[in-house]
Amino acid sequence: MHTATARLAVAFSIFALAVACGEPSDPTAPDLAVDFGMDAPTEDLAALEGGLVDALVRDTLEPDGPTPDLASDMAVDLAMDAGPTAFTADELQAIFAVRCLGCHIGGNTLGGLALDPDLRTQTVNVPALGALDIDRIEPGDHRRSYLFHKLAYTYLDVGGSGDPMPLGPGRFTDFELERLALFIDGLPVDLREQCEVEGDEDGDSLADCNDPDCQAAPTCQSELCENGADDDGDLAADCDDDDCAGFPACLVEICGNDLDDDQDTFDDCNDDDCLMEAACRVPYSEEEIQGLFSIYCAGCHTAGGASGGLRLDPPFAANTVNLPAVRGLFDRIEPGDRQRSFLYRKIEGTHVDVGGGDPMPPPPRVRLQALQIERIGLWIDSLAPIGDPELCGNLIDDNGDGFVDCDDARCRAELFCQAEDCDDHVDNDGDFLVDCFDPECGGAQGCGAAEDCGNLRDDDGDGLVDCADPGCNGDPACAAPEVCDNGADDDGDGFTDCADADCVGTPACQAGEDCDNLADDDGDGLVDCADPSCAGNAVCLRAEVCDNGRDDDGDGQSDCADADCAGGAACRVEVCNDQLDNDLDGFADCDDADCDGQPVCGVEACANGLDDNLDGLTDCADPDCAAALVCADEICDDQVDNDLDRLVDCADPDCVVAAYCLPEICGNGIDDNRRNGTDCADPDCALVPACGDEICDNGVDDNVNGQTDCLDVQCALTRTCLAPYTQQELQVLFSGRCGCHTGPAPLGQMSLSPPFTADTVNIRALAGGGLDLIEPGDPANSFLLQKLLGTQGARGGSRMPQGGAALTAAQLARIGFFIEDYVAP
């Protein structure tokens, strides 16, 4: 802006401070007048002409010398102009900051219009309120820009209403309007921030991701570091994105530096990340294992706990090594053999098929790391066995542990040590004797009962019915002898002639039956064990046991390959996850003992990253874990570790997208993290330049709002940017605005007639509550200033001046500075 033009514009602008907000010429005008406000009326422009204008111009432009001939300077400058050039946005912002101060600047939004802190965001492509289809500023077309028409006084031509902007001497000159038109016409039609291109394309002093327009742009999103997605659109997802450097899940454990590098609470060789490190695949010491048990088993097996009879307090080895497990098939610790150590199997979670109970530690407590379990296993494997192996049927305590044969935990899994079930037709203990034929069943129900020789039943369970049972020899029902060659069953035992055991050795049945040669030796049409002659023969006494891997009945077929086992329960396979009782034993799926130890019937451990029961659902996704504390949702603002992962609130990755844990964006007008306040009111923004104070005389835009020093609204009312009134200037102002107090009968006996200081300085105010009208050096306790500010209270009468607009903030500040500096003569 040329010197003379600038001086004249500023002079008009300062003068307009007193008259910028007047009454509307048409108080009923709707629509666009609402948008731009209705400038307040001047009280008496004539009263402000002359001395006040000169004083204001001199005070603002030439504080140290006389005011030049502005008209002459302007004429010279204009004569030198080759033609008008477009305003810059900063030049327009500076002009509006002065001419529109009371209505649309400094927090004033008369009619909904603010022209600060950034002119463009408030006007460009923003519709004007009202019925017209026209924007406040239409980029590239000043003729369709309503702000231009308000400033050019042509707003009625485009269907507008209300008053022009501004009223009074601050009106834009033709030269300024030409420059404004060039500015608007030069704006890009598509004035939008390009969020991926470096620069401030829309000219709002906020570039790229600092611009609220880019809030939803992919490149301005934060990368969430463990959701498998490229959140910020930079073609790198999660830990491959540099933004995730330092995120706990992306840290790498260094396996020998005594630090928990990945912040997962496990360091070095205690961390599963080091599972494949040779240096870490070494046995724990007994002391190290004792330390682990003290942490992971506290309350259950240590620190006074003895759940299931197991104590692991120091020294734990004394309570475990070579001692039988209460509920398991093995010793608690079998030296040299981790897989036969029930304690190891409990820790590993593979204990179900060798015993019962919960894994160790039980859910929902945190399990040991895989590497920790492996190192415990290596320690067990390194232990030397104590004594000789136990032989399970020699009635000797071979290994010297105090337990003989089947009483020794090492023998519990042997078939020889199983109990015989006396009514299931199975050789449970592998001694080739089934049910009542086994001495263990002596006295069992159904074993030892007398045979009733005439009821067609096997009452004593020996496989022989009625007279075929030797127990019926001599019984009256079996008294008739068998005639061995008449083709009749004379003795009624169900067998005829040579097929009857009674005929063995008789002349008619001289040839004996060889019971295992697959031939009919005695010619009775019956072969081997099907011939009654073989009844009682050892070959034919053995029933086929269908699940012991032996050919018990000597027919060349074993177990389920033997026709004798067709349809038998042992030869039906139970499918453990189809909700059917496949083997017809009355139990389905995991309720069937056949499914014991099957993974699908295992217990889902809820925090190990494995699908333990193979139902396709892992950890907390498995309904079995619904009630586990480790699967609880983390509440991100209650300072409690709800999901027991040792991470609280915003430190927990579960909270990475929670509003409470988001960073505060310090210039978008939103309380992003819903705590502590919005933007600069949030302590998170304390160090953001945009939330700092503007230093008014250093030539730097300290708060990064596009306004430097005195152009910044923070500085507008400071001494650096605003000089005190002189007594002469104040007298002109009071004479023009306070007619109630400058006449012969001043209202309230407060006279501001020349010289106003004679009747105000150190003069007690009638309704001032003990204050003087002007207290030199103390504006806050000067009742006259309180009246001008409107802070005089209910007993202090009306605000001054009455009947017109209040003094502007700049005028009031300069009056305060005058009182502060005034020294009474």
Image (cartoon, helix red, strand yellow):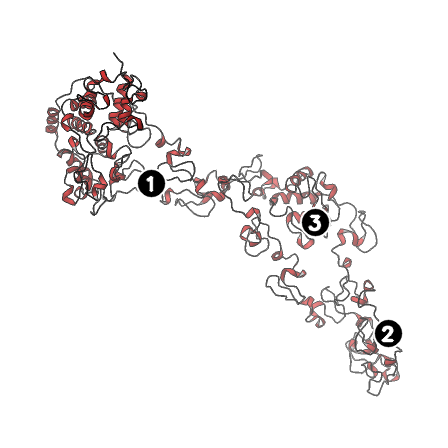
Amino acid residing under circle 2:
Gly
Whether residue 84 is situated above or below residue 384 in the rendered picture: above
Tell me: 631 left or right of 506.
left
Secondary structure at numbered mark 2: helix
Q: Residues within 10 Å of mark 3 (few under 14, many from 20)?
A: many
In the figure, residue 155 lies in which quadrant?
top left
Give the distance between the C-alpha atoms of the residues marked 3 and 1, in whole angstroms: 63 Å
**Mark 1 and mark 2 residues within 8 Å of each other at the beta carbon:** no
Q: Amino acid at mark 1?
A: Pro
Tell me where residue 573 sits by quadrant: bottom right
Q: Name the element at disc 3.
A: helix
Name the front one of labels 3 and 1: 1
Q: Which mark is residue 471?
A: 2
The N terminus sits in image quarter: top left
Looking at the image, which is closer to me, 138 or 25?
Answer: 25
| Distance from the alpha carbon under mark 1 to that under mark 2 | 103 Å
Can you tell which of label 2 and label 3 is closer to the viewer?
A: 2
Q: Which residue is mark 3?
A: 342
Residue to which mark 1 is pinned: 212
- Front tag of 1 and 2: 1
x%, y% of residue 160?
17, 43
Do residues under tags 3 and 1 come within 8 Å of each other at their CB atoms?
A: no
